[in-house]
Amino acid sequence: MSSLSMEKIEELTIEEIISKARSYIEDEEQIRVIEKAYNFAKRKHDGQFRKSGEPYITHPMNVALILISVYADYETISAGLMHDVLEDCDCTPEEMENEFGPVITKLVKGVTKLSKINFSTENEYLIDYYKKIIVGMSEDVRVIIIKLADRLHNMRTLWAIPEDRQKVKSHEALEIFAPIAHHLGIHKIKSELEDLSLRYLKPDVFYDIAEKLNKTKLERDKAVYDMEKEVSELLDEYHIPHEMKGRAKSIYSIYNKLDKGKKFSDIYDLMGLRILVNTEQECYLALGLIHSKFRPLPRRFKDYIAMPKPNMYQSLHTTVFGIDGYLFEIQIRTYEMDEVAENGIASHWAYKESGGSKTTANLQTTTEQKLQFFKSIIDLRNDKMSSEEFVNSVKDEVLNNNIYCFTPKGDVIELPKGATPLDFAYKIHTKVGETTVGAIVNNNIVPLNYELKDNDIVKINTNKTSTPSKEWINMVKSTATRNKIRAFFTKNDREIYVERGKYLLEKELRKRKLVFSEFLTEENINKICETIKVENLEEVYLSIGNGKQPVNAVINIIDKYEEVPAPKVVKIGTKAIDTDIIVSGIDKVKVNLAACCCPVYGDEIIGYITKGNGITIHRINCHNLEMLEDRTVDVRWNNDTSKRYLSYLLIYTNDSNNHMLDLVQSISMSNVSVDGIKIMNQSDKTTYEVACYVTGLSQLEKLILNLTKNKYVEKVEREIR
C-alpha cells in the first residue's frame, strides 16, 4: 500500500493490527487491552463517517497501525485507537478511566487537548504554537507520538478535503509536525510528512522529481543490486554477519537540494545502502573494509556513533565511488541503532517492555525524567511560557543530558552540564552576556566561573558600559558561548589594528612630507595591495596595525626612502651597550629619558643638554621644554632597540564604580606590564593613573585604543608631569 496513493485506503482489520502488535508485544494481557480499546472505539464511533466516505473507525485503526510501525507500547496503541473518543463521542473521562485506567485515559486526554489547538504557520506565531505542543508533550511524550500518527494518517487522506484546506494542513505538517518528528528521532514519520506536504504545496515540483526518479529507476536498481552483492561478498569474506537494505532518497530531501541550486544530475546520493551489523565494533570493521575496496569521497565521512545527534541518532555515514563509478551513500549501524534511527523514542518503551538493552533502558529513564521536569516547569510558570530561548533549546535538543535553570521571572534556560553564569547570560541574549559584571544564584553572590546546577535561579547583573574579558573563554562550557566571546574580540581587535594601521601610515607620510590623498591614489592602492597580497585598503591598514607589514616597507613600495645608517656603540657608565638614542654629531654621550614626559620608542623627541648630566630626552610636546634654556640638540631613536619604556597613563571613567581589577586585566591582555595603578580622583567619575612598561609607541597606542573600547572609559591620555 503506497502512503502517497490518492485512492481509498484498503480495508484494515483488527486481526491485522493485533498480528503486527504481537511481533514485539509478548504479553497477552496487553494484547487484550488493545482489542478492548478497538471494540470500545468502534462502538463509540458507530454511525460516524470521515470526509473520505469511510467509517470513522478506519482512522483510529490506521493511527494504531502507524504507532505499531514505530514499536509503540500497548498503552500508546490503545490510546491511539481511542484518541478521538472523548472529543467526538458520547464518553466522559470517568467512563474511560473505569474501563482502561488512569494512564491510557491521560494519554487520550492529552491528545484531545492538543486537538483543540488552532495551529498556525505564520512566522510570527510559530514559536507560540511550538510552545503549546511542548506543553502537551510534557505530560507524556507518547501524547505527541499519537498526535504525529494522527496527523500522518490525515495527510495520507488529504485528497478528501478542499484544496485551500489541503495547503493549510500541509503547511502545518511541514513546519510544525515534521520538525517535531525529527527532533524525536522518528525518521519514517518525518520523511513521509515532508513528502506528502510537498505533494500538496508544490505538486508540479513533486511529480517532476517523482517522474525523474521513475525514469532512472531501472538503472539505479541494477547499480544498487550489483553494489549490494559486492559489499555483501566482501563482508562475508571477513565473517561479518550483516543485513543489507537499499535506501531510497525521499522526494522532499531531493527537492531541498534542487532548491539550493543543485541540478538533478548532480545529486550524488540518490543511491544508497544501509548495512546492519550486530556490534559497534563490526560497524567500524565494515567501514574499513568498504573503504579498502571503494574509494571514499573526501569530506563526506560522518561518525554519528562516537558523536550521536541530539535525537540520539547513531550511524556511520560515508560516500564512495561504487559500481561503474556511481556514487553511493552508505550508512552502517547496529540493529538497535537502526530501530532508534527509524522509530525514535517511540520505540524505547517497546525495548523496555521486552527486556531490551541496558543502554536503551537508561535512555528511556533519562527521557522520562526530562519530560517530568518539563511538567514541573509548566506547573511553576502556570502555562505562561514566553521564552523563545526555552522553546528553541527544547526543540533542538530534545534528548540531550542538560541542566535547567530559571531566571528570576521564571523563564527556563537549558544549558549543558558544567555551564556557568556566563553561559546562562549569553543564552538569554548576546548583549546580556557581553555586559555581564556579576551573578547571583539562589540569592547568593557567586563568581562567574561557578558551576550551575539543576533548578538554580540565576540573576545576571549587567553594566551597559562593560565588555567581555578574554579570561571568559576559559570559564564557559558551551561552545556557542565560547564562539560568541571569541567573535567579540576578533571584531574588536580588527577594528583596533585597522585604526592603528591608518594612524601609523598617516604619521609616517607626514614625516616624509607626503600628502595622504595624493599618496593613496587608486593606482597606488592597487600596487600596494598586489605587492603585499591583500584585497583592499582596509586590509593594508590591518597588515600595518597588526605588525605583519612595517609601515616604511609599505610606503617604500611607492616612495623609496633612504635608510638611516646603523648606530654606533656607546658607553653608559661602565657597561657597553647599543644605545636606544642617537645624538646627531656626537659619538659618545650620556643620555637619560626625562621623567616628566616619559618618552617611548617611536615618539618624536628632542634632546636637552644638561649641566654635568649628559643629555635628557624629552617628547617634542613636553610643556617643560618651554621653561628650559635654548640648549636643545637633534636626536633620533635607534631602530634596533629592544628595551621596554615606562609610561604613565591617565584613564578617565564615566562612573564611580571600581574598575581597577578590570583595567589591570585589560592592560595585561595587551601584553603590557603594569608597574602600578592608583586612583587619582574619585567622585561621580573616577580617574586612574597607571604606570606601565611598553616596547614603544605602537604598543602604547594600541593599548590606549583598546582601553577606550571599554564603555566606562571616557578617554585615555598620556601623562606629562
Image (cartoon, helix red, strand yellow):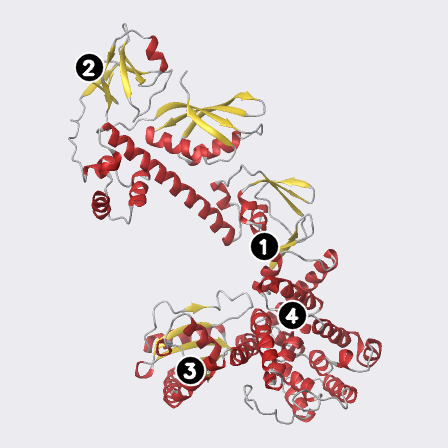
Type of the residue with mark 1? Lys
The residue mark sitting in front, 2 or 4, is: 4
Name the quadrant containing residue 633.
Answer: top left
Type of the residue with mark 4? Phe
Q: Secondary structure at mark 4?
A: loop
Q: Residue placed at 22% from the left, 48% from the top?
A: 530
The residue mark sitting in front, 1 or 4, is: 4
* Image mark for residue 588: 2
Measuring from the top left, give residue 660's x and y in whole percent. 52, 29
Residue behind mark 4? 119
Asked if residue 709 is positioned above or below residue 7 in the image, the reply reads: above
The residue mark sitting in front, 3 or 2, is: 2
> So how many labels did they put on this image?
4
Instruction: Give the mark nearer the N terminus: 1 vs 3.
Output: 3
Give the side of residue 307 with respect to residue 508, left or right: right
Instruction: Give the mark nearer the N terminus: 1 vs 4.
Output: 4
Q: Quadrant of the N terminus?
A: bottom right
Q: Residue placed at 33% from the left, 11% from the top?
A: 626
Q: Secondary structure at mark 1?
A: loop
Type of the residue with mark 3? His
Measuring from the top left, give residue 376's x and y in whole percent. 72, 59
Quote the CA–CA distance across marks 1 and 4.
Answer: 34 Å
Residue behind mark 3? 239
Q: Secondary structure at mark 3?
A: loop
Type of the residue with mark 2? Lys
Instruction: Give the mark nearer the N terminus: 3 vs 2.
Output: 3
Quote the CA–CA distance across marks 3 and 2.
Answer: 87 Å
Asked if residue 168 is positioned above or below residue 236 in the image, the reply reads: above
Quote the CA–CA distance across marks 4 and 3.
Answer: 53 Å
* Image mark for residue 417: 1
Give the side of residue 95 with respect to residue 497, left or right: right
Quote the CA–CA distance across marks 1 and 3.
Answer: 42 Å
